[in-house]
Amino acid sequence: MRVSIFRQWPDEPNSIKQYSDHLVDGLGRYNKGIQVQDSTPALSQPPVRLPRIAQKMFKYGYIYGYNPLRVRNQQGDINHIVEHLFAHLLQGLDPQRTVVTCHDLMQIAQAGLFSPAALPFINSKIQRWLLSFLPKAACVVTDSENTRQDVLRLTRCLPERVQVVYPGLGAGFQPSRGGTDRAAFKKKYGLGSSYLLLHVGTNEPYKNVEGVFQVLAILLRELGLDVGLVKVGQDFTSEQHRIIARLGLTQRVTHLGRLDEASLIKTYQSCDLLLFPSHYEGFGWPPLEAMACGLPVVTSTAGSLPEVVGDAALLSPPDDYAGLARMVVEVLTHTELHQDLIAKGLRRVRMFTWEQSINQLVGIYQKVQTEANRAHRRE
C-alpha cells in the first residue's frame, strides 16, 4: 500500500510537525508493507520583490489555489492530510481514498480564546470554508473524543466516519535514569526558589498564561509557598509582562524560550510540578510529556484534558485560581499524594504509544482502501 502524507508547508506549527514526523517515521518503522510518500511542498517565493500585502496574496494564492492542483499527481493508494486546515487539498485528491486528521476546532469552537486575527472576517470565512471539506473525506481522525464531538457538532460529517486515534508520545520522554541534577539546573538558569512550577506552551489566550501568574501570586502571598515559575515556549506578550510586573512576580518568573527536545526533557525532570490550566485543548501534549518524565501535573477540566490525564493528575476549572493554588500546595507538600500522582502518571502514559497509534491508522487505511476499491468496481 502506498500512503501519501500531505502537509501544507515546511514551517508548520511545532505540534503539527511533531505529529507529522512521528506519523511518517512510525509508518516506516511499524508497518514494513507500507510505502510512504511525504508530500510536503516548499513554499514558493514571488519572482520579484513585492509589497507586504502582495506577498500575502501570493502566499495564499499558492496555498489555496496552486497546491490543490499540484497534489493531483502525488496521490497514493491512500492519502492522509495531517491537519484539517489543509482540507482544501481534497479538491485535488480522490476523497474516497483520503483520510484527514483534525487536531482541534478551537479557532471556530472557541474563537474568543485566540489573539485577534488581522482580518477577522476573512479569517473566519477561510476557517469555515476549510471546514466544509471535512465531510467529503473517507474518514476524519481526531486526537480525542472531545475533538470528535466538536467535529460532529460543527460539520456534516457522519458519525461512523469520524474516529478517535490518540497520538503517541516520543520515546525520549521518561524519568531521569541516573538522577536529575536539579542543583545544576537551578544554577544554570539562576533559579533559587525551593519549588519550581513549570508551564509549557504558547502565550495564546486559551493557554491561560495569565491564570498561571494569578496562581503563582496566590501561592506566594496568601499561602506562603516559596515557589518560582519556569516558562517554556514563545516569549510573553507586552500585556503579560505588565501583569508580571503588576503582581510583583518579576524575580519569580524565568522564561527559557523554545527548547529542543533534550533540553525540554531535562526541564521536565528538574521542576517540581507542571501547572497547565488551559481554557481549552484539543489534546494537550505537555501533561503527558510531564507525566512520562515523572513530573506531577495540576491541570484544568477544560477541553480534552480530563480525557487525556484520567486520574493521574489533579484537575480544577481553569478560572478557579484559588483552587488551583491549593492543589499545587497539596501536591508539593504531601509526599504520599506526590508519589501517587507520579506512579499514576507513569502508568497513564503507557496508553499513548506511536506503535499503537500507527496500527490503528493502518487499520483505517485498509478499511478505506477496501471501500474505495469496492466503490470503484461498482462504477
Image: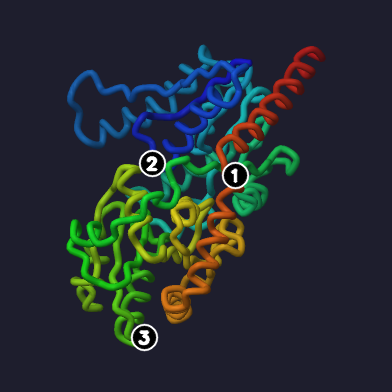
Q: Which residue is mark 2?
A: 14
Camera-nearest residue between 236 and 342: 342
Question: What residue is shown at x 39% (from left), y 61% (from top)?
Answer: 205
What's the mark number on residue 166? 1
Amino acid type, residue under disc 1 in the picture? Tyr
Amino acid type, residue under disc 2 in the picture? Asn
Residue farthest to the right? Answer: 378
Q: Is residue 303 visible?
A: no
Question: What residue is shown at x 75% (from left), y 14% (from top)?
Answer: 376
Q: Which residue is mark 3?
A: 223
Q: Is residue 87 visible?
A: yes
Q: Quadrant of residue 180?
A: bottom left
- Label 2 residue SS: helix
Between the residue at mark 3 and the residue at mark 2, the CA separation in whole angstroms equals 36 Å
Find out whether the residues at labels 2 and 1 contact each other: C-beta distance under 8 Å: no
Tell which circle, 3 or 2, labels the residue nearer the N-terminal end: 2
Question: What residue is shown at x 48% (from left), y 70% (from top)?
Answer: 338
Q: Quadrant of residue 3?
A: top right
Amino acid type, residue under disc 3 in the picture? Leu
> Where residue 54 sits: x, y (%)?
26, 31
- Label 3 residue SS: loop
- 177 with respect to 168 (left or right): left
Find out whether the residues at labels 1 and 3 contact each other: C-beta distance under 8 Å: no
* Figure check: 305 above or below 226: above
Tell which circle, 1 or 3, labels the residue nearer the N-terminal end: 1
- 9 with respect to 128 (left or right): left
Question: What residue is shown at x 47% (from left), y 64% (from top)?
Answer: 297
